[in-house]
Image (spheres, rainbow, N blue to C red):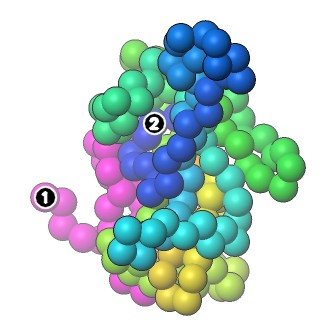
Amino acid sequence: MRVRIISFGTNWWAMHSRDLDDPYCFRRSAAWFNSAGLRYGRRLRLCWVYPGQIRFNLNSGFQPEHPLRAMGRTFLCSGPNHLGGRTHLLFARLLSGPAPDRYLVTMNNASNGRLSFTSPAWKSAGVQPISVSLRGLRYEAMLLMGRQDWVETDVGRWSISGDDRRLVLLGADAE
């Protein structure tokens, strides 16, 4: 599956090889992870109601020093897998050219409006949650969407823009 990254979640962490005698253990065998989380001042809270994460390995083409450079880029991914009660999405390698099949987007209450996760009609059938953090009215949801999929908030329906680069409110005038 080809996935274009529109936006990342708040929570970042890395894992390294267990061989601490290797001077490159923090780089050579490292993996970088991202998921939804809620920031309260300086604290990050993992209020997962839907636990999951995305993963980048060293050979994926991801640059951990510059994660925002991956936004708008398309990666070859294995399909979302469920392991240990979590959803995992591995970004295997960077692609240059083919159109994406799916889009990774992150929504939150401040940017996209309130979302009712208890409503059966909060998303179209093709939207797959990867990671969702929820506390009171605050949320951050990392979702895998198709080109025609949508998510409904109190502001309206959100979908992928015509240029495949961002999440836009359906019916709003194009900028």
Relative side of 73 to 18, left or right: left
- Disc 1 or 2, which lies upstream in sequence? 2
Residue 4 badge: 2
Q: Which residues are magenta?
A: 154-175
Residue 2 badge: none
Mark 2 element type: strand
Q: Nearer the viewer, residue 84 or 96?
A: 84
Q: Is residue 67 above or below residue 133?
A: above
Residue at x 36%, y 57% (from the top left corner): 167
What percent of the width, then of the height, locates residue 121?
A: 63, 79
Q: Is residue 160 above or below residue 68?
A: below
Residue 122 visible in the picture: no
- What residue is disc 1 on? 175
Q: In the figure, residue 14 lies in which quadrant?
A: top right
**Label 2 crowding class (10 Å Cα cut-off): few <14, some 14-19, many 20+?**
many
* The N terminus, quarter of image: top right
**Label 1 crowding class (10 Å Cα cut-off): few <14, some 14-19, many 20+?**
few
Amino acid type of the residue that numbered disc 1 sits on in the rendered structure: Glu
Amino acid type of the residue that numbered disc 2 sits on in the rendered structure: Arg
Residue at x 69%, y 29% (from the top left corner): 78
Q: Residue furthest left?
A: 175
Q: Is residue 173 above or below residue 71?
A: below
